Image (cartoon, rainbow, N blue to C red):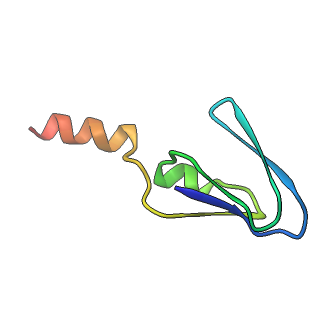
Amino acid sequence: MKVTNTGPAAHKLSHAGKEYLLAPGNSVEIDLTKEEAKEIPHPFVASGKPIPSEKAEKAKGEAK
C-alpha cells in the first residue's frame, strides 16, 4: 500500500523493523494488511490494495 504523510511537517513512520522519515506530501510503498492500514497513525494515510492477512490465508487453506 502507499502510505502518504499528509501533515505539515516531516514525520517518522516505523513498520516491520524499518523506519521511514517522510516529508509532507511524500509517500512510501509498504506491504500492509487491511488491519495494519487502519492502525496507521495520523498524519499518515494508507491507500491502495492491502496484502492478505494471515487469518484470511489460513481460512482459505482450511476451506480447500
Compare residues 57 and 46 and report the one nearer the observer: 46
Residue 5, percent across and down? Answer: 75, 63
Q: Quadrant of residue 60?
A: top left
Compare residues 22 and 43 and report the one nearer the observer: 22
- For the point 48% across and 64% down, the residue is 48
When the figure is inspected, residue 61 is found, relative to residue 51, above or below; the finding is above
Left or right of residue 49, residue 63 in this image = left
Question: The C terminus is located in which quarter?
Answer: top left
- For the point 90% across and 63% down, the residue is 9
Q: Residue furthest right?
A: 9
- For the point 31% across and 44% down, the residue is 56
Residue 44, percent across and down? Answer: 72, 61
Left or right of residue 8, residue 17 in this image = left
Left or right of residue 19, residue 9 in this image = right
When the figure is inspected, residue 19 is found, relative to residue 12, above or below; the finding is above
Residue 3, percent across and down? Answer: 63, 58
Q: Quadrant of residue 46?
A: bottom right
When the figure is inspected, residue 47 is found, relative to residue 41, above or below; the finding is below
Residue 21, percent across and down? Answer: 81, 47
